[in-house]
Image: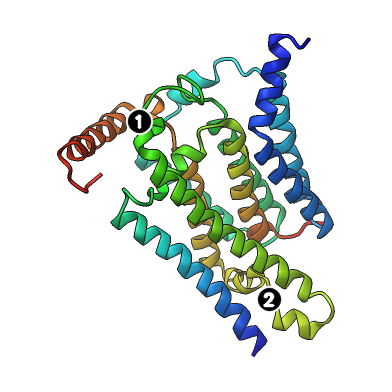
Amino acid sequence: MMRAITILVYCLIGAAGVAVVVRSRRRPDELAPAATMLDRAMASRASRLTLIAFWWWLGWHFLVGNAT
Amino acid sequence: MAGPAQVTVRAGLRRDSPWLGILLLTSGFQFGRGAPIAGAAFVAALAAVIADDLGWVRVSGAQALARRFSPPVALSITVGAALAVAIGLQPQFGIGTGVLVCLAGAGAVALIWPDARGGVDGEGRLHSAEHEGPIRRAAIAWAAVAVALCIWELLNFFLSLPSDAADWNHPALSDLIRPFITNPILRVVFAAVWLVGGYALVRRRPYDDLPRGIRERRQRADEGGGQDAESGSERR
């Protein structure tokens, strides 16, 4: 039961992300599209390095694992 | 009294302090959970940002190199697909996979290092006032989703520690996803999606740095949206 609830909450958070994407595509004057957000987020070198570090970590974590 | 250089350094560190905080917290968490390589990677990113703010990093010709190194989309797809297959065919958690992932990361850092022409505060539509409201609202929405995910993930990480039963009842997101990518085909798919995400990040550059054909198409699309905005249409 608890496992199901845990998975359900993950699904709800994912659905919230999809809802943001859908809303921004329908009403870009209200909510900027993800592409515009990325353009702004990638404007400074610090933010670029941070986002790339997280992107890289996703690949490392799932493909290579916890190498201790 | 601080000279102009010191004022610039302080301003840069202050401007980048949120990102420095994120990198510091994340590296600490990675070390705490027993992932030293991941922790070291975030420390390296932190050090790079600080060194850049202190003016210690000067990469001559980086911008010209990045502009020259704008491969056609077809070539990017081919290379990305080959890399995804190579990663998928390697043993999971193997050294070969680690090398390929590190190479992809190093390549991404090299591509995103140069600033756009004009720098952070350069002119362009990205910084026009009409975008501020929608961008602020989108930033809040995405931040809410990201914070919710981080909190739920952290909560389940700590709740899963006491016992095997607790570990089963409170799986982390990676525990749910990882069983699927033991399959080599699904691992290729995951690697491909990961690389597409990286490509989406490294190609987010203002107009001036884009290859000519893409730059002209984006400018025409944007001019069409601007004209619609003047006529009162809802289309951006």
Amino acid residing under circle 2: Pro
Residue at the image point whose x is 65% and y is 51% from the top: A57
Please identify the quadrant where the C terminus of chain B is shown. top left
Closest to the observer, A10 or B82 = A10
Cβ atoms under marks 2 and 1 closer than 8 Å = no
Amino acid residing under circle 1: Arg
- Image coords of residue B79 (percent x, y): 46, 44
- Image coords of residue A66 (percent x, y): 75, 59
Residue furthest bottom in the image = A1
- Image coords of residue B57 (percent x, y): 68, 20
Question: What crowding class fits label 2: few (fewer than 14 Cα within 10 Å), some (14-19), or many (20 or more)?
Answer: many
Give the chain letter at badge 2: B
- Report the side of B174 relative to B225 (left or right): right
A52 is higher (above) or lower (below) than B126: below
Q: Earlier in the sequence, mark 2 or mark 1?
A: 1
User: What is the number of the mark on residue B73?
Assistant: none
Q: How is the image coloured?
A: rainbow
For label 1, the residue is B125
Question: What crowding class fits label 1: few (fewer than 14 Cα within 10 Å), some (14-19), or many (20 or more)?
Answer: few
Residue at the image point whose x is 61% and y is 59% from the top: B147
Residue at the image point whose x is 50% and y is 33% from the top: A43
Closest to the observer, B216 or A23 = A23
User: Do we see residue B147 in this rendering?
Assistant: yes
> Residue B144's quadrant in the figure?
bottom right
A6 is higher (above) or lower (below) than B70: below
For label 2, the residue is B171
B23 is higher (above) or lower (below) than B91: above
